[in-house]
Structure formats: structure tokens, C-alpha cells
Image: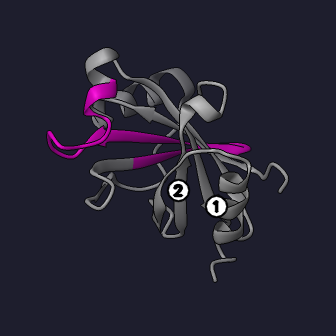
Amino acid sequence: MKLGRLNHVGVATPSIEKSLETYRTMFGVEPRGAPFDLPAQGVRVCFVDAPNSQIELIEPLGEASPIVKFLEKNPLGGQHHVCFEVPDIHAAKADFEAKGARVLGEPRIGAHGTLVFFVHPKDMGGVLTEIMETPGEAH
């Protein structure tokens, strides 16, 4: 398997609205759409387009959200993960596991409506890495 396109950088935030104001002020950009809840992932999400990728702003959706602990350690928020595209999510998962990487759960629908999974940061040089099936190529 080869490294695919960088789809987005996930940025955890205690407030999507405050983060959007920062992106508006600093970069003059608007969100791609309104923030939306992704209950299966435990987060509220909003995307900001960059010329070659996206920023995914993620806010906890309740106290059970997987990013609550991250925000406890980083109260202002910060880079949470990077996301790369692959043409076949199941082949990618098998490849990562064959190489000894810890895949965190089964593929599930992510914020772009395609299947995703995460690879443990300890197996990716300290970076939580999301692997996403390229939109339009879902099987």
C-alpha cells in the first residue's frame, strides 16, 4: 500500500464557533457548510477548505466523546489527527494489521460519508492517523 492523498487535518476544539472565527480572522475563509453532529463518532464536525486539503474542526459531542481526554490535556485544542485516502478501506486495514499496526476498531462511516478507521499513534510515529476510503470509490 502506498501513501494516499492527504484529505484533512483534524483539529480538536472546545468550540467550533470560536475556531471558525479564528479561521475567518486569520485566513479570511468560511466553512464549507454548517457544523453537524456525528453521533457515531461522538463529535460535532465542520470543514474548512484549503487549496489542497481541508481542516476538520472537531468538538466533543458530550462527555463520552473520544476527544474529551485530548481537550483535557490541551484545553485550547490542537492538531488531533491526519487523514489519508485509500482506494479500498478493507485492503488498507488488512495491510496495516499485517504490518503489526494497531487498528482502532472496525471501519465505520466518517464525516465525509465514507468508511474510515484509525491507526494507533504509537504505530505511526506519535500521530493518530485516520485512513479514509476515497470518496466516490466506496465498495
Across and down, in percent, residue 74 comes to: 34, 16
Would you identify the image quadrant in which residue 59 lies?
A: top left
State yes or no: residue 14 in magenta: no
Residue at the image position 46 percent from the left and 30 percent from the top:
24
Q: Which quadrant holds the N terminus?
A: bottom right
- Callout 1: SS: helix
Whether residue 84 is visible to the viewer of this picture, yes or no, is: yes
Location of mark 2 (residue): 117
State yes or no: residue 57 in magenta: yes
Residue at the image position 46 percent from the left and 33 percent from the top:
11
Amino acid type, mark 2 = Phe
How packed is label 1: few (under 14 Cα within 10 Å), some, or many (20 or more)?
Answer: many
- 58 on left or right of 79: left
Q: Which quadrant holds the C terminus?
A: bottom right
Residue at the bottom extreme, as displayed:
139
Amino acid type, mark 1 = Lys
Residue at the image position 54 percent from the left and 69 percent from the top:
114
Location of mark 1 (residue): 93
Label whose residue precedes the other's in the sequence (1 or 2): 1
What separation in Å lies between label 1 and label 2 (alpha carbons)? 8 Å
Nearest-to-viewer mark from 1 and 2? 1
Q: Are marks 1 and 2 in contact (CB under 8 Å)?
A: yes
- Callout 2: SS: strand
Across and down, in percent, residue 35 comes to: 33, 51
Q: How many marks?
A: 2
- 115 on left or right of 5: left
Magenta-drawn segment: 46-70
Please tell me which residue lies in front, 81 or 58.
81
How packed is label 2: few (under 14 Cα within 10 Å), some, or many (20 or more)?
Answer: many
